[in-house]
Amino acid sequence: MDLENNDKSDPDDFNPEEFDSGNFDNLKIPDKSEDIVGGIDYFIRHKTLFYPQPLKKGDKIALISPASEVKEEYVFGAMSKIMQRGYQPVLMEYALGPSDGSFASSKINRLTDLFNALKDEEIKAIMCTRGGYGCAQLLANFSYGMVASNPKWIIGFSDVSALLALWYSCDVASIHGPMAKHLANMPDNDPCSEALFKILENGGKFDYSVGPHPYNIHGKTSGILLGGNLAVLNDLADTTYDLLANDRREKDVILFLEDINEPIYKVNRILWRLLLSGRLFSVKGLIFGQFTDYKPDKNFTTMEDMINEFLNRYIMPEIPIVFNFPTGHTDLNFPLVEGAEIELEVREDFVRLHTI
């Protein structure tokens, strides 16, 4: 395959030692007062959120590994699928290592790849190859202008929820969706991959209808869709990247959550933190995605049983609530746009979630 490898870095534009100085006095916390270089022509303004421009056939999609190391066959398989859809995959220099312990590469190398993908104006989207752990290490090295001056889609979930939170803190839309393993292993007609590329091509629009769940709370609402991996978002609480921070509560938020390999009691503990902080009371809708790879405990057989009991006992919800939505660490992982304005309708026989 003729796969482009972007191994060019410009030392005049990027100094890894300065970029990752370890001096927390110089962290590049996103500052919305910072001038945005490049102007409004670089993106589509969607009310309070910058939407990257829709992709066209022939556009370049970068692949980076910002967290844990990834198998080569997943990366090359994903690149093949991207080519089949008419796009040019760009394998960033350190996406396949050299690995640094469990990380895909050193922190400086992972920063370099993300920085170079952002500054390359020919790259229109950035696909993360895998989650795992490591994205939180990168957040404070990016300023508001670095992300918003030439905004482009970033795609991923799990640990990549940290980067999606960075994008939202910079007022740029992003995609919580499938990564390299999914694209490589799933068939060409996989509905989640189809939905991902439709979002990329149609300016962030999506429309899903799924079946009911006995714990669903019926109702209809609209608001800003925010969320991701529960454990990752919990670790970002009270930081600049907190999706439910106080300065964002004036917006009606529809919160979606998923997780893997977290015991029932730990998820319960996080829900208590959200309750005690008052942040669960600020949401207009709740979407619980897939919670996988956990074991029953003495209190609850399933995660859904625990969540349902918690909500009914302590919140008495009068908002629409969805259980078992197909997003998370499963083959059915429908992409969602972080920060999108959506409408959620929960009825007895179906659930509909769509952009407005």
Image: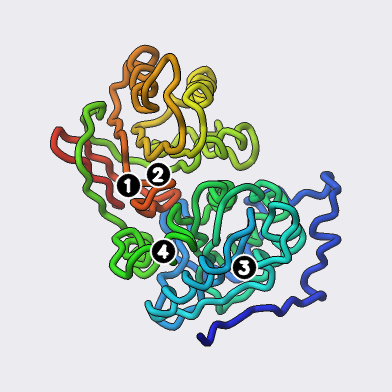
Q: Position of residue 352 (x, y in %)?
A: 22, 45
Viewer-nearest residue: 247 or 201: 201
**Residue on which disc 2 sits:** 225
Seen in the image, is 239 located left or right of residue 307?
right
Mark 3 is on which residue type? Leu
Q: Which of disc 2 and disc 4 is earlier in sequence? A: 4
Please name the amino acid that badge 1 sits on. Ile
- Identify the mark nearer the N-term, 1 or 2: 2
* Residue on which the image places disc 4: 185
Q: In which quarter of the image is residue 126?
A: bottom right
In the image, residue 239 sits, relative to residue 195, either above or below, namely above
Of residues 187 and 19, the one drawn nearer to the viewer in this rendering: 187
Residue 102 locus on image (x, y percent): 69, 52
Pointer 4 local density, CA inside 10 Å: few below 14, some 14–19, many at least 20: some
Residue appearing at x 44%, y 25% in the figure: 280
User: Which residue in the structure is indicated by mark 3?
Assistant: 118
Residue at image location 39% in from the left, 81% down from the top: 86
How far apart marks 4 and 1 lie (CA) works out to 30 Å
